[in-house]
Amino acid sequence: MRNLIDRNFERRLAGLTNSGERKVLRGGRKGVEKESLRVMPDGEIARTRHPEALGSALTNENITTDFSESLIELVTPPFGESWELLQYLCDMHQFVYRHLNDELLWATSMPSALHGDDSIPIAQFGTSNIGRMKTVYRNGLGLRYGRIMQAISGVHFNYSFSTHLWDVLQHVSKSSAPRQDFMSEQYFALLRNYRRYGWIVLYLFGTSPAVGEGFFAGREVAMPKFDAHTYYEPHATSLRMSDIGYRNKNQAGVSVSVNSIEDYVRDLSKAINTPYAPYAELGVKVDGDYRQLNSNILQIENEYYSFIRPKRVAGSGERPTKALQRAGVEYVEVRALDVSAFDPVGVNQNKLRFLEAFLALCLLKDSEPLGRSEQDRLDENHVLVARRGREPGLMLQREGRSFRMLDWARELLDSMQGLCEMLDYSEPQRPYMAALEHQRAKIEDVERTPSARMLAEMRQERESFFEFAQRMSKVHKDYFLDLYPPNEQRLNTFSAAAAESLEAQRSIEASDKVDFDAYLAEYFRH
C-alpha cells in the first residue's frame, strides 16, 4: 500500500512539474484567526467588557470575541503572501493595544490565572436575535464542557489553493467532473490525509506542554507537577490538543466522516438533530431563560471540534452545512495550532510556509476512504503526540502496524521537498525550503521544538507556567507599543471599521421582526 501511495503522489507531482506551469502551487490564499485572553497586569482574566473602541464583536469582521467576553479573536482577510498576512496581523495587534489601557493579551494557549468557571465571563453580542443566539450557544458550551476548557486560545490557519492549480490538477487527474465537485472531492482527500499525518503539526508547533493549577479547578490531576503551581507532561507538545483540552471525552462518541461532502453533512446533521439525555437534564429554557440552544449532541455545527474543517463562506443566516451543500468546499481551516509564546503575533512565516506546503502534500498524496476503526487509531496518534510527542522512541499506528514517529516524520518532510522547490520557483531566497529545513532541525533535535524550548526556559528562569506566560505577555505588549513608525493609515481604517460595526449592530437590533423563540425555530428549520 505504501509503495502505491508513493507512486500516485509522484505521478501527480510529476504531472504538475511537467505541465510547464512552474508557479502552479503559488497563489494560494491564506488567512489567520488568532485568539488571546485579555488579562490584567497581575495575570487575572479581565472582567471588563470588550472595548467599545474595537467595535462590535457581532459585526466587526476583523476584531471579535470567541467564547468569552475576555477572549479576543483577530481575523485577517485572505492574502497571497504570508508576509502580507503577518503585517496585517501585527497592525491589528497595535490597534488593539492602543485601546487596552493596562490590560495584556495572554501569550499562550493555556489560560491565565483562573478561579473556576465563574471567573470567565461569557461573550455578549447585544440584544438582537442573532446576538442572543451567539451568547446562548456559548452558555451551552460552558454547561456542557466547562467554561475553563473554552478559555483555551488557538490559532486557525485558513487556506485555499489557487484557481490555476485546480486547472492543472484536474487536467493531470483526467477528471471530467464539474469544477466545484472536483475541488470539493480533492479538499476532502486533503482532510483525510490531514487526519493521517496532522500529528506532525503538534510535534513541530505545539507550545503547550504545561498548564497552571487553576486550569483543573481543584479536580484530581493525574499529571506530574513541574513546580508548586504548574502541571505538565515531561514529553508533551500540545496539552491544548490532548484529552485534557479540546479532545474532550464529551465528544468521544461523535464521529464525523470526511470520506465525502455528503457523508460529512450527514454525520454532522445527525449529531445536531439527535437528543442527548445528559444535556436534556441541564435544561434548555428554564424560567424563561435559555441555557443552551437545544439538548442535542451538538447545538450547532461549530460545536464539533476537529483538527481541520472544510469551509464555505455562508450567507446571512445560512448554516455551515447548508453552505457546503449549496456551493461546495471553498477553503480549509486548520485548527490545531497553539498560540506561539515566542512570536508576538502568535505565529511566524516559517510556520505558515510549512503549513502551505504540508497542505499541498495532503492534497496530492493518495487518500483512500477512512473507516471508523482507522479513524479511531488516527485520533489516538494525535492524542499520543500531544501528550508524549517528544518521548524517545515513540511509536505510532500506521496501516495496522507500529511505526517510529521520527522515521515517519522524516519521510513526510522528504516528500515535501519537491513541493517546496515548486513553491520557491523564482524566489532567490528559497523561503519554503528554508521553512522545511527549519522543521527538519526539530526532527533531528527535539530540544528545538517550541514545547521543549518553553520548558527549558521555565527551568532556566525558575518560573512557573503562569510566571513564564505573564512575562512573555508583557514582552509582547512592549513590542507592539514600541513599534515605530506605526501604519497610521491602516490603524485609521480599523478605527473606522469599528465605528461602522457599532452602527451595523444597532441596525440589526432595530430590524428584528420576530421574537427569539420564533427566530430559533426558523434557524433550525432550514
Image: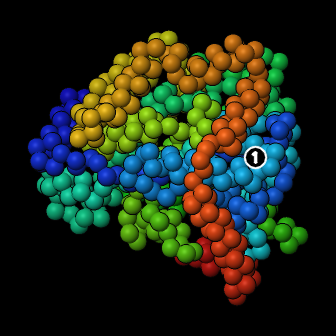
The residue at 69%/77% (across/down) is 503
Q: Which residue is mark 1?
A: 38
Question: In the rendered view, would you say 381 is above or below 444?
Answer: below
Left or right, residue 213 beside residue 35: right
Position of residue 243 relative to residue 445, above or below, is below
Residue found at x 47% / y 66%: 313
Q: Is residue 440 left or right of residue 162?
A: right
Asked whether the viewer can see residue 157, the reply is yes
- The image quadrant that residue 193 belongs to is top left
Viewer-nearest residue: 93 or 127? 93
The residue sitting at 15% across, 42% down in the picture is: 17
Q: Residue 500 in the image: x percent, y percent? A: 65, 73
Which residue occupies 41% across, 15% down? 444
Count every numbered label the image shows and give the total.
1
Give, as a three-letter code, the residue at label 1.
Arg
Q: Quadrant of residue 58?
A: bottom right
Q: Residue furthest right?
A: 287
172 to the left or right of 46: left
Give the image location of residue 67, x and y in percent: 70, 53
- The answer to whether one can see residue 374 in this image is no
Quadrant of the image for the N terminus?
top left
**Secondary structure under the numbered disc 1 in the rendered image:** strand
Closest to the observer, 479 or 435: 479
Quadrant of residue 522 within the rendered picture = bottom right
- If the image is split into quadrants, where does the C terminus sit? bottom right
How would you rate the neighbour count of disc 1 (Cα within 10 Å): few for under 14, some for 14-19, many for 20 or more?
many
